[in-house]
Amino acid sequence: MKTVRIIGGGLAGLSLATGLAKRRIPVEVIEAGSYPRHRVCGEFISGVDYSTLEKLGIAADLHDAKLHTTGHWYRQGRKIMTTELPDPARSISRWRLDARLQQRVEGLGGKVVTETRAGRDPAEGTVLAAGRPLEKSRWLGLKCHVKGFRMESGLEMHLGSNGYVGLTPVEEDRFNICGLFQLQPSCRGKGSDRLMAYLDEGGHRELIERLRDSEIDESSVSGVSALSLGWQKKEDGAFVVGDAGSVIPPFTGNGMSMAFESALGSIEPLTAWSFGAESWSSATRRSMAIQRQLFRKRIRTSLALQRALLNPRGQSVFEFLSSRNMVPFNTLLSLVR
Ligand SMILES: Cc1cc2nc3c(=O)[nH]c(=O)nc-3n(C[C@H](O)[C@H](O)[C@H](O)COP(=O)(O)OP(=O)(O)OC[C@H]3O[C@@H](n4cnc5c(N)ncnc54)[C@H](O)[C@@H]3O)c2cc1C
């Protein structure tokens, strides 16, 4: 059997490695960083079904994730809507989850090489799971963990004039605050000060007060700016999974699900290649076709919805409709899943 080499040990790379190692396919993950580590992420997983996690062999790693069905929506501090998810979202920190998956891969006999940066060029037997390619963009993602935060039960989503912020309880009295903002050079500062500057600019005064009353873990503050949304540019013939292939707007809470789903959809083609039953180019084409079919509708709809949620007129319409219980939440949700 031939070894599958995976560049990038985030959720897509590690869950793919677990799924392959579980089927006794030799696998090696090359990761630029080390574990545990914080990642810019809202840290709630919505839209993935249990059977996907089981087939990947990672369901046990999410056994203690918190489950939430209620979402509270705010616009610049005003509560505008409460929604119920048909299936619970799972919340768990990337600090905990990525480290568990690394151990899972190794426990199954796979190899994970950390603190090693590999090239992104396509090569036979190499899967690119290295996240978004670095590209100039107008987006900035910022996140931090806080303790002792006051929050209603469930999840909170705050719309502001410059983006949105999601609040998620994770483990051990920790809460994750993560936002996507339009880059503004005037919003500066070190550590959490920069997040505060963006929150202030977006009109989130009430949120800032709540953050001031809690304990911010400065070591968890992370940011990412080279962030393009939608289908990603890739080299011809590259075998990609997760964000390396497509990035869904974060408000959907579906990016991690897509990392898992793209990993699962790649296992069969990679297994066939490893056994010598399929050429590399055919396995690559098959995996891409599966991902296009799974993600086309949700990428298109979520990009349109994000445009609406990020402009003042769209937000006013959303607020008006929510005040009359007229937001077709379940229909919209089904379009981004
Ligand atoms: C602001 C924001 C909020 C989000 N909130 C949510 C949310 O609430 N729910 C949700 O489901 N999704 C959310 N997402 C999306 C989610 O984080 C991603 O979709 C998910 O992390 C994709 O996983 P991945 O494995 O493809 O990429 P990543 O998790 O980015 O992993 C890529 C890995 O590759 C490594 N790497 C990169 N280059 C190399 C190289 N050359 N060599 C070796 N290793 C390399 C990196 O170190 C990293 O570990 C959010 C994203 C953003 C930006």
Image (spheres, helix red, strand yellow):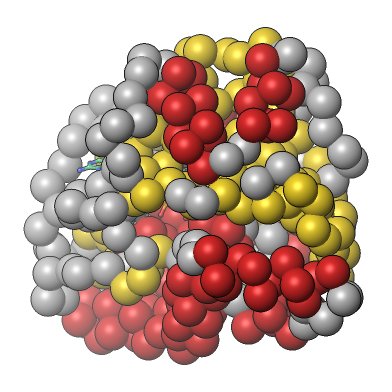
Q: Position of residue 336 (x, y in %)?
A: 60, 76
Q: Is residue 41 left or right of residue 153?
A: left
Residue 290 visible within the image? no
Q: Is residue 7 left or right of residue 323?
A: left
In terms of depth relative to the viewer, which is nearer, 256 or 129? 256
In terms of depth relative to the viewer, which is nearer, 235 or 276? 235
Residue 159 visible within the image? yes
Q: Is residue 225 left or right of residue 221?
A: left
Q: Position of residue 318 (x, y in %)?
A: 69, 71
Give the answer, above or below, for where 311 lies relative to 165: below
Q: Quarter-wise, where is residue 56 in the image?
A: bottom right
How many marks overall?
Answer: 0
Q: Quarter-wise, where is residue 292 in the image?
A: bottom left
Q: Locate the C terminus and report the quarter of the image it occupies.
A: bottom right
Give the answer, above or below, for where 27 lies relative to 95: below
In terms of depth relative to the viewer, which is nearer, 322 or 236? 322
Q: Is residue 121 left or right of residue 20?
A: left
Give the answer, above or below, for where 192 lies relative to 286: above
Q: Position of residue 295 (x, y in %)?
A: 48, 79
The structure residue drawn at horizontal position 51% and vertical position 13%, both measured from the top left corner, is 218
Q: Locate the N terminus and report the quarter of the image it occupies.
A: bottom left
In terms of depth relative to the viewer, which is nearer, 201 or 28? 201
The structure residue drawn at horizontal position 46% and vertical position 49%, both measured from the top left corner, is 162
Q: Position of residue 18 (x, y in %)?
A: 52, 51
The structure residue drawn at horizontal position 64% and vertical position 26%, both measured from the top left corner, is 208
The structure residue drawn at horizontal position 26% and vertical position 35%, both measured from the top left corner, is 185
